[in-house]
């Protein structure tokens, strides 16, 4: 189902955007054998690089379904976007109450989102607090190498009060085996490699995006990151359900992809700003 709608600490937002924009439309293959599975194709992933946060659940979510959990007191609405959204009408999103956004920047070590500049700077320009995310391919290269690629192509951070720390997207493999051919301990090591490198380059602990089902299966429900990395949990339902890995609470909850990925931040706008400042 196609989702609808129309660097380091010293790296400024403008430099990060320039780096991303200079990359241009990306057609490079993350790895020679990375071809979308049938399930990925049903979720409108037809080429390497087209994966997006929540693709597996989105691919089974009926187009007519609209999950709309009640907004808890003090929560803040956000969205996340990728190349599937193209050029986003950010003014309309702002008018609809969206106050923050994450944009996919990279995947693996060769893909960059060709719409990144419009999406990342566009959300900022209408007043949103924004961040970037990386879709992990743990079977393609090391965590550290992918963190470097991410930071160099829009995933950096600056203490401007409007830039959120990067997000590491850990979820079902759209190109092959669910856990990318890794054992639970191997997956935890890979994640640590990415997060350690990202923090070394930016000074920030990245947000981890995942689902309880994937995290349980592919990391052994590891609790290695609960005290350092904010949780972004994916569950298309009226509640976030059981959280993975022993996280005591979620920071962000992705609750639907219809008509676009929508998310609640578990706090009011002052807490969103606090995460941005660090």
Image (spheres, helix red, strand yellow):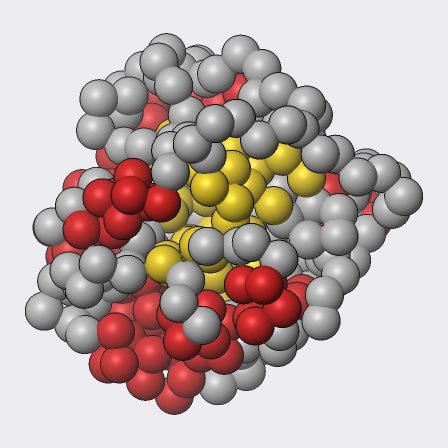
- Across and down, in percent, residue 145 comes to 28, 56
- Seen at 41% across and 84% down, the residue is 21
Q: Quadrant of residue 220?
A: top left
Residue 120 x, y percent position in the rendering: 43, 70
Q: Nearer the viewer, residue 160 or 155?
A: 160
Can residue 102 be seen?
Answer: no
Which quadrant would residue 275 be assigned to in this image? Answer: top left
Query: How many marks do you count on the picture?
Result: 0
Q: Is residue 163 visible?
A: yes
Which residue occupies 71% across, 71% down?
A: 6
Q: Relative to the observer, which residue lies in front, 124 or 7? A: 124
> Residue placed at 81% from the left, 52% from the top?
1
Task: Indicate the position of residue 98 as horizontal and vertical percent values.
Answer: 53, 54
| Quarter of the figure with residue 82 | bottom right
Q: Residue drawn at (52%, 26%), measured in percent from left and top?
A: 72
Please determine whether, in this image, residue 132 is positioned above or below residue 179.
below
Q: Is residue 237 above or below residue 107?
A: above
In the rendered structure, the answer to whether residue 149 lies left or right of residue 59 reads left
Considering depth in this image, is 123 or 28 the residue closer to the camera? 123
Name the spot of residue 209 as percent of width and height, x first: 45, 37
Q: Is residue 192 left or right of residue 22?
A: left
């Amino acid at each position: 189902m196609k989702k609808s709608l129309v660097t380091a600490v010293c790296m400024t937002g403008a430099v990060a955007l320039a780096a991303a924009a200079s990359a241009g439309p990306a057609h490079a293959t993350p790895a020679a054998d990375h071809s979308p599975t049938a399930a990925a194709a049903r979720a409108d992933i037809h080429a390497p690089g087209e994966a997006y946060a929540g693709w597996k659940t989105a691919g089974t979510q009926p187009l007519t379904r609209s999950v709309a959990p009640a907004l808890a007191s003090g929560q803040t609405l956000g969205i996340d976007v990728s190349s599937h959204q193209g050029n986003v009408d950010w003014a309309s999103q702002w008018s609809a109450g969206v106050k923050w956004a994450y944009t996919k920047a990279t995947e693996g070590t060769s893909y960059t989102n060709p719409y990144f500049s419009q999406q990342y700077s566009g959300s900022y320009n209408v007043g949103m607090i924004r961040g970037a995310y990386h879709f992990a391919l743990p079977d393609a290269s090391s965590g550290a190498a992918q963190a470097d690629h991410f930071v160099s192509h829009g995933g950096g951070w600056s203490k401007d009060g409007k830039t959120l720390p990067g997000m590491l997207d850990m979820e079902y493999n759209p190109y092959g085996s669910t856990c990318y051919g890794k054992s639970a301990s191997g997956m935890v090591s890979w994640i640590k490699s990415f997060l350690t490198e990202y923090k070394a380059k930016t000074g920030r602990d990245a947000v981890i995006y995942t689902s309880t089902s994937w995290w349980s299966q592919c990391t052994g429900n590891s609790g290695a990151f609960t005290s350092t990395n904010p949780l972004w949990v994916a569950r298309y339902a009226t509640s976030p359900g059981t959280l993975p890995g022993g996280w005591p609470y979620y920071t962000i909850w992705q609750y639907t992809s219809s008509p676009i990925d929508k998310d609640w931040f578990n706090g009011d706008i002052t807490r969103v700003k606090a995460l941005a400042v660090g």
